[in-house]
Structures are given as C-alpha cells and as structure tokens.
Amino acid sequence: MLCGSCCDCLARTCWRKKELKARSVWLGCPEKCEEKHPRNAIKNQKYNFITFVPGVLYQQFKFFLNLYFLVVALSQFVPSMSIGYLYTYWAPLVFVLSVTMVREAVDEVRRFQRDKEMNGQLYEKLTVRGKVQVKSSDIQVGDMIIVEKNQRIPADMIFLRTSEKNGSCFIRTDQLDGETDWKLKIAVVCTQRLAADLFSIRAFVHAQKPQLDIHSFEGNFTRVGLLDLELNRLTKALFLAQVVLAFVMVALQGFVGQWFRNLCRFIVLFSSIIPISLRVNLDMGKTAYAWMIMKDENIPGTVVRTSTIPEELGRLVYLLTDKTGTLTQNEMIFKRLHLGTVSYGTDTMDEIQSHIIQSYAQVQKPTAAAAAPKVRKSVVSRIHEAVKAIALCHNVTPVYEAGAGDGGETEAAEAEQDFNDHSRTYQASSPDEVALVRWTDSVGLTLVNRDLASLQLRTPSGQTLTFHILQIFPFTSESKRMGIIVREEATGDITFYMKGADVAMATIVQYNDWLDEECGNMAREGLRTLVVAKKSLSEEQYQDFESRYSQAKLSVHDRSLKVAAVVESLERELELLCLTGVEDQLQADVRPTLELLRNAGIKIWMLTGDKLETATCIAKSSHLVSRSQDIHVFKPVSSRGEAHLELNAFRRKHDCVLVISGDSLEVCLRYYEHEFVELACQCPAVVCCRCSPTQKAQIVTLLKQHTSNRTCAIGDGGNDVSMIQAADCGIGIEGKEGKQASLAADFSITQFKHIGRLLMVHGRNSYKRSAALGQFVMHRGMIISAMQAVFSSIFYFASIPLYQGFLTVGYSTLYTMFPVFSLVLDQDVQPEMALLYPELYKDLTKGRSLSFKTFLIWVFISIYQGGVLMYGALVLFESEFLHVVAISFTALILTELLMVALTVRTWHWLMVLAQGLSLLFYVCSLFFLNEYFDLPFITTWVFVWKVLAITLLSCLPLYIIKYLKRKFSPPSYSKLSS
C-alpha cells in the first residue's frame, strides 16, 4: 500500500502542470528572480542533437510502408524464412532511410541558421557599469534594455522611460494583432520623471500571472501531406492483397507440411507488391518540386521551408487569409471629399487647395456668412470649415527627427515656431487619421505641433493658429466615432468637432438628403468613409457641459453610463460638414488573383483583427465580394437564443457573403458549432473581423474537422502564426510586419499575387506528378509480383523466387529508376494555360488523380501484363530455365520503359535521355551477368523476336485503349492542348 501511494504521488508530481502564479521582477537584477525562466530564444527546430536519429526513425516507421519493410528485412535473419540475399532487402531500406535523414538534416540546419539570425540580433543592456551589448537570446527577466527607434522589441517589456519629455512613445503591435499603425504608449510616470539613473532606485514590478491572450500560439510538431496518407492507405490495401495471395498459394498446396512457414515465405516472396522505392521516389520528387518552385523567375523570392508537402498546394479548397499586409499594403490614401452638392476627387484636389489659400487670405475680412448666418454659405467657406475640422478632429501627433537624441532640437524648433517639413512624420493609432492629416497638409493646412493641451496649425500664408484642447472623446468600437472640443486662441471660439462612421453619425447630424446615398456610393468603390460634423458652443454652454461631465466622471455607480449620457446631450443637431473617402491600397494584382482562386473552386475566408466596417470595405474593394453578391452582416449576439434567431435569419439568405465578428463567432461556436460551420461553408466567401490569433487557428481547425477538405492559411504577421501552423498548408508573406509568419510557414512568398502561380502551376503539377509517380512505382512492384505468382502456381506452388540477387535490386534501381523518376518533369498543360483556365485546378480537389478507382486500374494492368510476360516466356522458352529468366526479364524491362512513355504527356529532353541510358545500362549488363543470362542465346534473333512479341502483346492493347479514350472521351487538359 505504501509503495502504491508513493508511486501515485510520484506520477502526480511528474505529470502535474506547472502552476502559473503572479511574480515580482526586480529592475536590473535578474539574479533576484525567485524562479527559473526559459531563455528568450526563438526555436523553430524539430529536433536536437540527441533526438534527431530517434525522432526521424519514429516519423518514418510510423508509416505502414516503412514498418512493413523493416519487418520483412528482419525476417531474413530467420533461416527458414530467408529468400535470396540479405542485401536485396537491407540495401534499399538503408538507402531510403539515409535519403530521408539527409533531407531532414538539411531542413534542420536551415531552421537553425534562421533561428540563429533572429536570436543573434544585438540590443543594448543597461547595467551599473554602463551600456553593454547583448544578444536577443541572452536577455533575461529583469534586464533593462534600451530599444532604439525602428528596432524590434525583443521580449515582453514594461515601458520605463523615453527620450520624449512627456513620456510618450509610438509603437507598432504588428506581431500581436497584425496592425502596422502606430499606437501611443506612456511610460511609467515615476521612472519617466526620475532625474537620476534608474539604478539609483530599488524597485520591482509585480506582474499578474500569465493569461490566455494574443501572446499564446499553437503549433504542430510536424506535417504530413494528404497524398502521403492516401498512399499509406493504398499500401495497407496492397499488404492485404499480398497476404490473401500468399494464403491462396498455401491453400492450393493443400496446407501440407509446415504450411504456416510457407505462408510467411510467400508473404516475403510477394513483398515486391509494396515497393520500398515508393517512399524514396516520392521524397526525391518533393525535393525536385521544391527546387522548381524556388527557381521560378515568375515568383522571385519564394522559399520552400517544408519540402514534404508541395503537392498539398494542388488540392486546396479553403484559403484563409489575413487582411492587413496580406491583401492590403496598410497605406491609406485620401481619395474623395463630398460636401453634399459638390464632390472632389484626386483629379480636383488642386481646386480645394486654391479655395483654402483664398479663404485664409480673406480670413480677416467680414464675409457674407459671418454677417448673415442664415444665408447659404459659399463653396469656399464650406471647404474652409471642412478642411479645418479634418485638421483638428483626430489623435495624430507630428514627430520631428532629433539629431541629438534627447529631443533638444525638437524643443528648440517648438520654441521658435519653426517646424521643418522635411523632418516631420505623423504618428497615430489609426492609419486613416494619418491619411486625413497628410491630406490637409497637401492642400495647405498643416498640423505642425501637438501636446496633451493644445495643437497648432500652419496656414498657406505661414501663419500659425493655436487651438487649446478642452476635451477629447476617443474612438471606441461601440460608439464608432470620436470627438474633440477646442478653443481657438485668437478668437476664443469654442467648437465641438466630431467624426465617425455613417451609421453612428446619421442620427446626430442635422437633416440632409444626401448622406446615405453618397456613403453607399463610396462603399461600393471600396472607400472607407467618415462623416465630419461640428457644433459651435458658447462659453456658458461649455461650462455647463464641463461641470456635468466632471461630475459624471466622479460617480461611483454606473460611471460609464452617466459619462456617455452627458456626452450624448452634446451630440445633437450637429452641422454636417463633409463626407471623406479613404482608400486602403491593395497589394499588387490582388483583385485578379482572388478572381483566379475563385474560378479555381477555392473558397476564400478573410480573418482579420480589424473592425467590421474596415473589413467589409476591403472585401468589396478587393472584389472578394462580387458585384452580384449580397453581404449578410451577422448581428452581435451574446446568448444562445440570440444566436439561434440570427442563424435562422442567415439560413434564409442565398449566395451571400457572411461578415461576422469574433465575439459573435465565439457564441455561435459554443452553442451551434455544426450548424454554423455548415451554413458558413455554403457561402462563396466569409469575412471574420475582430479575430484573435487563437480564434483564427480555431476556425482553421473547425474547417478541417467538419469538411475534411484541405485548408491553406496565408498571413504576414506574428499574429498569423497560429493560423498558418494549424492549416494543412501554411504560406507566409515576408513584409512590413516582420519575418515571423514567413519563418513559421511551409512556403514563403514576397507578394500575395504569387499565390496564383504557386497553386495553379506548381501545386497542380506537384500533385499530378506525385500521383502518377506513386501509382507507377506501385505498378512496377505489382507486375513483378504477378509474374512471381504465375511462376509459383505453374511450378507446383513452390515458394522459390523467380529473380534473385542483382536482378531484383537492378530492376527497381539501375534499369527503371531514371525513366520512372523522370515523370516529375511531366506536365499536361503549359503554365500559361493553367493560369488562363483555373477551372483545371478544380478537378484536382476531388482527388481523382489518385483514388481507389485509378489504383484498381493499375492493379488490373499489372495483373494483365505480369500474366502475359510470364506465360509468354514459358510458352516460348526453349529448353533451359535460364532462357525463361532472360526472355521474361528483358520483356519486363522493355514493358516498363514503354509504360513510362505511355504515361508521359509532355516530353522533356531529360526523359528521352533517361530512357536511352536505362536501355543502354541493361543491354551492357547482359554481357556481364553470366549467372542469369545465357550469352549465346541472348545474341540470337530467336531471343529478340520472342522478347519483342511478348512485349508487344503486353503493351499494344494499352496503347490502343489510350488512343480510343483520348479520341472519344478526352480529358479537359487535352481539349485545351489541342
């Protein structure tokens, strides 16, 4: 009892998960850490020095094919089961394992080199003795690191101090949420204001325990292609046929003597039914496909990081893509300004510029609008107010390059009111806002300075206008709008500006008859729209608002509701100024590429962390949603009942694109997972917005489970890694968001448009070539097994081999290996034709190139040809058994070469060379293998005509059938070729 209790306790201790708890981290003192933390190193390797050999062997022998040959090879050490020479079984097995290990070793070395490059990036560490350089992988918990401008943050960090006097810093979170826009962060107040060195204080950070958030990623240990799994199933079927055949032989013997031993001998004798060269041929073929992909000049920079699954690219049904940086460049361009009665586009921006110059030149003169507010405002006045509102209502901060690094140059510039246009950049949490402010700069009204209390604009005449910021109401996903109250220093006028989505602004602006229509027009063009409005406030109105607003912010109960109510009291009857249209520039050739993929039968799901409106705009502008399709926006749901009602409403829609948020998706998957996935899969496209990395991976996993179709995920940021690794095939784009997605993916490309050629040409060719190569290698094994079965049945079911020694090894290597392997160069259509007719790709998703139907066809061909070759040789042989071997084996080699020629659809000069060399090798070896061939006999015309007759009888019917099939029922690719 005591031992049992001890064992249970030991087991619980060994298998218990490490408990996550809060921790205290001392500043600059890693040695004070209470617990041991892992290294800050990136590791994409699958093995280490110790686990490499066991790991590779396990990955190989978990396949039935390799395990089977290991058992067969081991059986040859048993004398009663020994058939032929040991090397005929062990040499091919060792060769296959050696090729696999070399390939895996090369992949591991490449992963190690990539990891070494990332882990070797240098950073400056702050110590009591000054600054020292440290590698990224050597950074420890508690170290204080100096991160320079435009440098990647190497680990989870707390922001202590910045060179800006107000403690602000703009960072990009592209490795977390995929967004490349700049986000404002403020340093810890006490450390920012500290005049002395950071080591002058003894401080620590108390951090909460790790949480399940967007920093968590899921990964797969290894990948296995569907083709490998299908061939694995076919080899199991072949093994079953092999056992049945051996059992039939023993049964026809009458189960005499040690029949079980004879059964095992027959199983070994028919072992060539399952060819060991299948594995090595396919692996070498995949390496060849990877080399072809990387050498394709039409998709430069493409890297194959996993050389085991190139044929997966040829049978994809679902493509799950990120938005920012993948479909778009995340570069916003201002495209349109609409004032209700007049609209300005990119070709008429110069008119706006002239109006702005005119308005500020006359700003000191009394205008008709000022004298009589009831009179309709002029176009110049309306443009003036609209541009001014856009230049003021935002959270953009201008940043100037500082030469000294301490902000001295910037401060001097501010003091002198002399801002250098060449050194100024704009930073904000939204790229849309930066685009708007850049546009106001281009038309003459420039944002030159901003701090927490004020902002300054420069007019076309060079005059600087100062506005004091009284209140800011930031954008939220619930309100869908942001506002600002400013007081102009020169006039004292107080104005409340607001901008936001049309759905949020339509009810709070004054009545108009054009907003809805123009918003729809811009949305159809793929533009992101913002409605801009204003409200002038008197001093009394503002003071009343401020008192109520301050009181609401001090409330203990329902503070957020009371604050929102006070702000809403201000948001009434706003004067509509304008409607803006901003375009998120798409990557090159995104539209034709998406159309190509759609025509190929691939369904595209866009998974993004962006808000719903932005995702919908990009879906329209990229033509992910065609003009004839409707969009069904899934309403926000939070309960089972709401999800049920919304799913029923969605079920009534047909041929519409689904747009759903991450929160609603989670509710649907919690209660109606099967129903939701079934309905979503019927849509031509799906857009999921506000998705976390974990949700992206979850969607991929659900598609794989519910549809059994092949999925591909493509992205460019660290937030896409989980999705990429969860898919059957992962593609990373090396772009602005770094290399994390590229390094974690199976394939790396430089532009989204390259995915068209990668799938339509290389994916299609890889799959069709691998299917043809795999089936032909199996045919090569089955035909010789059929000959063995005929031979044994004629000679009293004796379990003796027909061909021994070098003939067995040479048959699958020297004599037929090169012609068979040359099938990796075959193609049914030219690459241009495959891109012009993407419908050809759709046929591959049904798996018809490698199915039980095609497999059975090759089985019947093998049985027919094996029977003809063996019976023909026995009927035509002279008097010696050696003549049977010579005639049948020579006819067998010629048959294999002719069958390769029959299979080829487009000849390559290397194919012709392989055929010629193999035939030459065989003819030359006839004169040296006296043990197997009677030289005087094989040099006679009798031998030649008998071999030709048998070969013609085995191959001619198949050539006739192929001709008739191409004439009366041609495949789709042959129609295009003709």
Image (spheres, rainbow, N blue to C red):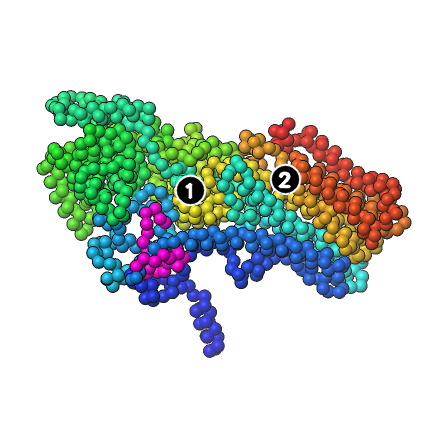
Determine crowd level at label 2: few under 14, some 14-19, many 20+ residues with C-alpha closer than 10 A.
Answer: many
Q: Residue 64, can we see it? A: no
Q: Up-down: is 229 above or below 418?
A: below
Residue 147 lies within the magenta run: yes
The residue wearing badge 2 is 825
| Corner quadrant of residue 203 | bottom left
The reply, left or right, for residue 254 in relation to residue 743 is right
Name the amino acid, label 2.
Leu
> Which percent across, then down, holds residue 227?
59, 46
| Residue at (34, 46) in percent of width and height | 150
Q: Residue furthest right?
A: 879
Q: Quadrant of residue 531?
A: top left
Q: Amino acid at mark 1?
A: Gly
Q: Residue furthest bottom?
A: 2
Element assignment for label 2: helix
What separation in Å lies between label 2 and label 1 (alpha carbons)?
Answer: 32 Å
Residue pointed to by mark 1: 735
- Name the secondary structure under disc 1: loop
Write the residue at 72% across / 58% down: 87
Disc number placed over residue 516 in the picture, else none: none
Residue at the image point whose x is 83% and y is 52% from the top: 930
The answer to whether 293 appears left or right of 864 in the picture is: left
How packed is label 1: few (under 14 Cα within 10 Å), some, or many (20 or more)? some
- What are the residue bounds of the magenta stretch? 130-152
Depicted 969 relative to depicted 749: above or below: above
Please indicate whether residue 53 sits to the left or right of residue 809 in the image: left
| Residue at (52% x, 48% y) in the render | 305
